[in-house]
Amino acid sequence: MGHSGNGLRARPVSRTGAHPGEVELRYAVTQEARALLREALLHQALGGRGYMRVLAVARTLADLEGTVEVKAAHVAEALAFRIPAMAGWRS
């Protein structure tokens, strides 16, 4: 990644080359969960890679629970694993 010649930063992508929005669709992320992820990005609690990792952990938590959708509770728990100070954050 890094900077392109025009001074704009490249959008974060997963290891598969997918844009986060594509991954969110594939992972069936609810609007509330998506908002919580974006809020963590805006508050600089996560970077691009951290966003993708939290999303992957949230998807795993949803799978363990047997739900199709990744919900805000899954994202909040994944954030708590990544950033212990955020335990209980916006849940």
Image (tube, rainbow, N blue to C red):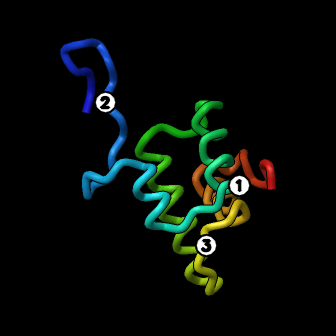
Q: Amino acid at mark 1?
A: Glu
Q: Amino acid at mark 2?
A: Ala
Q: CA distance from mark 1 to mark 2?
A: 26 Å
Question: Residue under circle 2?
Answer: 10
> Do tag 1 and tag 2 residues touch (Cβ < 8 Å)?
no
Whichever of labels 1 and 3 marks the residue nearer the N terminus, that label is 1
Q: Quadrant of the C terminus?
A: bottom right
64 sits to left or right of 1:
right
Q: Residue at x 65, y 31 (%)?
A: 43
Disc marking residue 32: 1
Q: Amino acid at mark 3?
A: Glu
Whichever of labels 2 and 3 marks the residue nearer the N terminus, that label is 2
Q: Quadrant of the N terminus?
A: top left
75 sits to left or right of 16:
right
Instruction: Name the image quarter holding residue 64.
Output: bottom right
Q: CA distance from mark 1 to mark 3?
A: 11 Å
| Mark 3 element type | loop
Where is residue 44 shown, x and y percent of the image?
59, 31
Question: Residue under circle 3?
Answer: 69
Q: Residue at x 22, y 21 (%)?
A: 4
| Mark 2 element type | loop
Where is residue 23 shown, x and y percent of the image?
42, 58
